[in-house]
Image: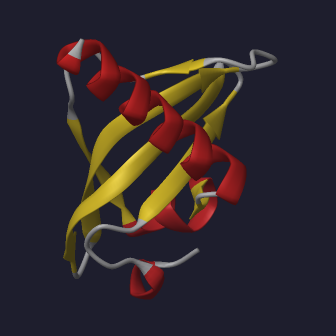
Amino acid sequence: MGINDLRTGLLVQHTTPRGTDLYQVSTVHPHGAALQWVYSRARGGQDGYLPSRTSVVMFSNREIDRHLRPASTQMANRFQAALDSRRAEVEA
């Protein structure tokens, strides 16, 4: 994935040895992008979680090329299910 593939609102994945984080693209700049951390799933775990406090991370073009990829349908669906669950808790 490259900087030219990013657009505001796009969901992307970053996988590390501890698990997979889901980010949403906030802004794109010529030398990188700001992404908001929105969801995580631990390595080997089926359940993910929404961060208690959101954070925005700056990724350089090099990091984008090496570490980010478009979000899988499965990861995006898990994120949506977590959002729906959180909304149901608030409404109850």
* Colour basis: secondary structure
Q: Is residue 31 left or right of residue 59?
A: left
Q: Look at the image and tell me in which quarter the C terminus lies.
A: top left
Percent position (x, y) of residue 31?
26, 74
Query: Residue 39 lies in what quarter of the image?
Result: top left
Q: Is residue 22 above or below residue 48?
A: below
Pick the front one: 60 or 69: 69
Looking at the image, which residue sits at the far right? 44
Query: Residue 47 lies in what quarter of the image?
Result: top right
Looking at the image, which residue sits at the far front? 92
Pick the front one: 81 or 65: 81
Q: Look at the image and tell me in which quarter the N terminus lies.
A: bottom right
Residue at 19% in and 76% down: 29
Q: Is residue 22 left or right of residue 41?
A: left
Q: Is residue 80 left or right of residue 69?
A: left
Pick the front one: 78 or 68: 78
Looking at the image, which residue sits at the far bottom? 4
Residue at 48% in and 63% down: 64
